Image (cartoon, rainbow, N blue to C red):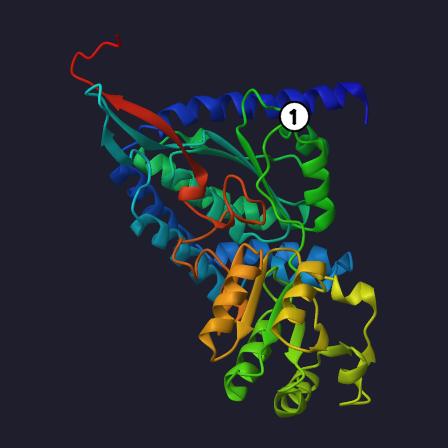
Amino acid sequence: MTEEIDRDIQAYVRRLGAAAREASRRMATMDTGKKNLALQNMASLIEDRMEILLEANGKDMQAAQAANMDDALVERLSLNPERVRAMAEAVQQVAGLPDPVGEIDNLRNRPSGIKVGKMRVPLGVVGMIYESRPNVTADAASLCLKSGNAVILRGGSEARHSNQAIYQCIQDALIRIGIPETAVQLIETTDRAAVGHLIQMDDYVDVIVPRGGKGLIERISNESRIPVIKHLDGVCHVYIDDRADPGKAVAIAVNAKTQRYGTCNTMETLLVSEAIAEQVLPDLIRQFLDKGVELRGCEKVCAFSDAIRPATDIDWATEYLAPVLSIRIVSGLDAAMEHIEKYGSHHTDAIVTEDWSRAHRFLQGVDSSSVMVNASTRFADGFEYGLGAEIGISTDKLHARGPVGLEGLTTEKYVVFGDGQIRT
């Protein structure tokens, strides 16, 4: 790349940043009703323009298949009528959620006579960098708008046509309601240098949210001058305790792996207590093999079927994002938690048990952003958690953790109310 081209890209990205900063000031005090009306219009336009969106996605899918793109990325890229309707429903759900902006909590009287509380306020400008998933365009826009932020979107080149079609729905909705179009901006260039400039632009952007492969997120985390909300891996576990209901355990484990393969909340390792292995593993192995899942297991698991390959140490730490599953028989709850601590990614882990004391120990002892009892890991999702959608999932501990919705896109400031008090 010539220096002149790089300077042009930098100037372009900085123009977007300056416009976003100005829009964020207006969004911070935007009336809730107006924001909701824009989101309702956005949802309607997405559903009304389904054919246009599917046609645009078809172009991206053809290009992806011609480029022999990884199956997991192709699955994330694809849209169908059900996914378009779900996208519109997620936007509509965000419109129906309480607006966190301006909420004042913990207002209390002080001996001086002043009242002190905390007000929830927008972060400001969000930089969203993502791969494959076109629905992120709508999810990020709706969450940022409702939480009073401006957002700069940078989708992957593989989803260029899909993102542009969805973005047009967003822009048309903003224009209808009289909200600044620059509250949501899409970086049009596919040049990767734009990302490098965006993540260095700390004078205009307040937080970066990357969604994509581990390589992308590691690069953003290492190079960004701006705080990053991220997770690197989704090495999720289901542990079947010896006090589990066998039928419940089989249903949860099969769903956690096979409902969708290419998502960060898909189970990648199944842990089974040795005391219940004979009851559940034959059925589980049969169902997984019937669904075309490649199985890799410890020595004890391999004894159940010749179709199971021996697992390596690398397998236990791998996010497959594919129909591949590692299975390990463990001595009990403590061994399961030790395995999760050693190999897990602090994303989502579940226990299946009818023993509440063990469930409680698992909830307290497993250090993940979502910890579940008797439920599929596939529920670790902003929509399923009632957040409307999610801008991402954070495995960090500050300032947001787990699926990041409206509250995660805000921060707090102290507010003080007095009646002429002075400090003596």
Q: Is residue 289 above or below residue 356?
A: below
Please name the residue shown 40% across and 43% down the image: 407
**Nearest the camera: 228 or 281?**
281
**Nearest the camera: 343 or 59?**
343
Q: What residue type is labelled 1?
A: Gln
Q: Name the residue under label 1.
A: 200
Toward which corner of the image does residue 8 lie, by quadrant? top right
Please name the residue shown 57% across and 72% down the image: 256
Q: Is residue 299 above or below residue 57?
A: below
Quadrant, the N terminus: top right
In-image side of 326 versus 90 (left or right): right
Q: Please identify the residue farthest to the left as the structure is shown.
A: 419
**Nearest the camera: 323 or 418?**
418
Residue 51 x, y percent position in the rendering? 48, 59
In-image side of 387 versus 163 (left or right): left
Please name the residue shown 59% across and 23% down the image: 202
Please name the residue shown 53% across and 49% down the image: 136
User: Does the rendering let one see residue 375?
Assistant: no
At label 1, counting other C-alpha atoms closer than 10 Å, the crowd grade (few under 14, some 14-19, many 20 or more) is some
Per the image, label 1 sits on a secondary structure element best described as: loop
Toward which corner of the image does residue 221 lie, by quadrant? top right
Residue 152 x, y percent position in the rendering? 53, 34
Residue 411 x, y percent position in the rendering? 42, 34
User: Does the rendering let one see residue 109?
Assistant: yes
Q: In this view, does 113 lie above or below 146?
A: above
Q: Is residue 28 above or below residue 134?
A: above
